[in-house]
């Protein structure tokens, strides 16, 4: 086997594999012998079918398989040994002529190879990247505390409807005279949440209403003609409520209100554990919790700014566009060529960052361990639980949950990717000069508009 390289340009090469019969003949003979042992044909004992007949029946397919093995092994060994950074996969050259394996003693197979462009990056303190820390203000603190108090509060029955209460009762459709319509729609045990009504006039009709009294309102106006909401309220299918604009009489049978937990030691301990006994300690925990949640926003913005900084460094890379498009279309025969042309610039931007990441990993010797993947899983679980107010997660529960997650191959792959991204960004953060800036949440959000 002889392999020669032809350089087309900086990002395209052609590899020519000169293959002789001797490269695969012995492997073909071995496979034919193995096939003969297994073949059963009428008139012959198992394993006793004449070799010539076996060759006639299976020689062509076995030869093709063995030639492909030789080609693939030689091709990918060459790529690995010569450290070629291949984009996509090798593609058979368009000028390749068919090969007759029956007669050919020697033949050449050519592959078009798309190569990643060469570039250099600087990863030191000369690179400046902004890092935004979001201030935790009193408004955030108050909103978080109120949410916690409602979460840990209790539901009680009341006699008068308040702004955030849940109202249950029976409904009856009214006619044009405001009387209950004979044969009209009736609903038993209906539930309304006045605070979620879009129609302010309809919402106000429920404010201050008392138990066992009736409220006449218009569901279509209350929910801005949202058929999904109206269907849910009237306990019907969506196609059954189309065009319903009538008023309904809602007779209140029950009003429930959420009473917030009191700001006392029992509440503090319930949320943050036995060591949290004072309001000062409680507020400090709340502040730290919000800061931790906002830190993920800061990290996200840093990631974007770091990417922009390094992409600016390398500039617009020259990619083997024709080869890559050819490979992408061959890989997915249902891919639309016109859509590919539209998406290609964005795809090359993503590929640019992928190559930058690979260079950082190689230059800094970044590796990933099983512990890194588990740590990523634990961080994900903590973040999910924090969204539900479960910040004091028992370690034993966390460990069990993490173990179950990392066993799932799909989730493990996603965790591996996110863990590697986190490690790359950690190296970048340590290497560059951070321009630290503290800003308010509104100013931070403006950056994404």
Image (cartoon, rainbow, N blue to C red):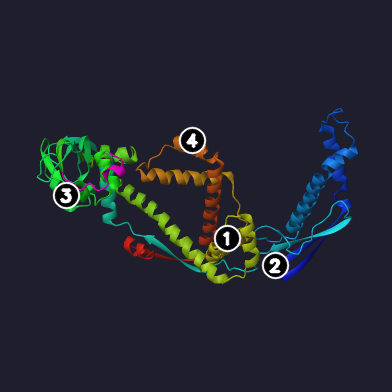
For discs 2 and 1, the disc positioned in front in the rendered view:
2
Distance between the Cα atoms at labels 2 and 1? Answer: 19 Å
Our reading of the magenta stretch's main secondary structure is: loop
Foreground residue, 418 or 47?
47
Residue holding disc 3: 202
Distance between the Cα atoms at labels 3 and 2? Answer: 68 Å
> Can you say whether 61 is above or below 71 in the image?
above
Q: Which mark is residue 400?
A: 4
Q: Residue furthest front?
A: 183
Q: Is residue 208 left or right of residue 108?
A: left
Residue drawn where x is 18% and y is 53% of the image: 200
On the image, which quarter does residue 348 sit in?
A: bottom right
Distance between the Cα atoms at labels 2 and 4? Answer: 50 Å
Distance between the Cα atoms at labels 4 and 3? Answer: 49 Å
Foreground residue, 192 or 144?
192
Q: Which residues are magenta?
A: 236-247
For discs 4 and 3, the disc positioned in front in the rendered view:
3
Circles 1, 3 touching at the beta carbon (< 8 Å): no
Circles 4, 3 touching at the beta carbon (< 8 Å): no
Residue holding disc 2: 12
Image quadrant where one finds the C terminus: bottom left
Circles 3, 2 touching at the beta carbon (< 8 Å): no
Residue holding disc 1: 354
Disc 1 crowd rating (10 Å Cα; few below 14, some 14-19, many 20+) is: few
Q: Secondary structure at mark 3?
A: helix
Which of marks 4 and 1 precedes in the sequence? 1
Residue 219 position, x and y percent, is: 20, 46
Image quadrant where one finds the N terminus: bottom right
């Amino acid at each position: 086997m002889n392999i020669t390289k032809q350089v087309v340009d900086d990002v395209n090469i052609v590899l020519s594999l000169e293959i002789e019969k001797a490269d695969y003949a012995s492997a073909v003979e071995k496979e034919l012998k193995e096939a003969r042992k297994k073949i059963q044909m009428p008139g012959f004992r198992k394993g006793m079918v004449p070799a010539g007949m076996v060759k006639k029946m299976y020689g062509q397919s076995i030869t093709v398989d063995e030639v492909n093995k030789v080609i693939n092994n030689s091709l990918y060994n060459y790529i690995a040994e010569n450290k070629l950074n291949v984009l996509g996969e090798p593609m058979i050259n368009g000028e390749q002529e068919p090969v007759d394996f029956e007669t050919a003693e020697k033949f050449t197979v050519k592959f078009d190879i798309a190569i990643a462009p060469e570039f250099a990056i600087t990863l030191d303190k000369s690179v400046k990247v902004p890092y935004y820390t979001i201030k935790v203000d009193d408004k955030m603190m108050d909103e978080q505390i109120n949410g916690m108090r409602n979460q840990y509060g209790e539901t009680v029955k009341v006699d008068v409807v308040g702004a955030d209460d849940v109202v249950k009762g029976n409904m009856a459709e009214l006619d044009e005279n405001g009387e209950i319509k004979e044969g009209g729609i009736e609903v038993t045990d209906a539930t309304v949440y006045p605070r979620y009504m879009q129609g302010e006039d309809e919402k106000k009709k429920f404010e201050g209403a008392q138990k066992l009294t009736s409220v006449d309102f218009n569901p279509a106006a209350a929910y801005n003609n949202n058929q999904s909401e109206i269907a849910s309220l009237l306990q019907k299918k969506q196609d059954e409520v189309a065009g319903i604009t009538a008023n309904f009489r809602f007779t209140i049978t029950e009003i429930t209100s959420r009473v917030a937990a009191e700001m006392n030691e029992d509440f503090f301990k319930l949320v943050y554990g036995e060591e949290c006994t004072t309001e000062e300690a409680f507020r400090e925990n709340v502040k730290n919790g919000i800061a931790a949640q906002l830190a993920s926003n800061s990290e996200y913005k840093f990631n974007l700014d770091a990417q922009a900084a390094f992409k600016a460094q390398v500039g617009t890379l020259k990619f083997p566009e024709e080869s890559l498009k050819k490979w992408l279309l061959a890989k997915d025969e249902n891919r639309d060529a016109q859509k590919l042309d539209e998406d290609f610039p964005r795809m090359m931007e993503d590929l640019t960052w992928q190559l930058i990441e690979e260079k950082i990993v190689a230059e800094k010797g970044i590796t990933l361990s099983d512990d890194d993947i588990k740590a990523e899983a634990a961080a994900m679980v903590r973040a999910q639980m924090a969204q539900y107010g479960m910040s004091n997660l028992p370690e034993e529960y966390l460990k069990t949950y993490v173990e179950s997650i990392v066993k799932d191959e799909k989730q493990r792959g996603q965790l591996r990717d996110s863990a590697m991204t986190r490690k790359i960004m950690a190296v970048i953060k340590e290497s560059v000069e951070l321009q630290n800036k503290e800003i308010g949440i509104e100013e931070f959000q403006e950056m994404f508009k």
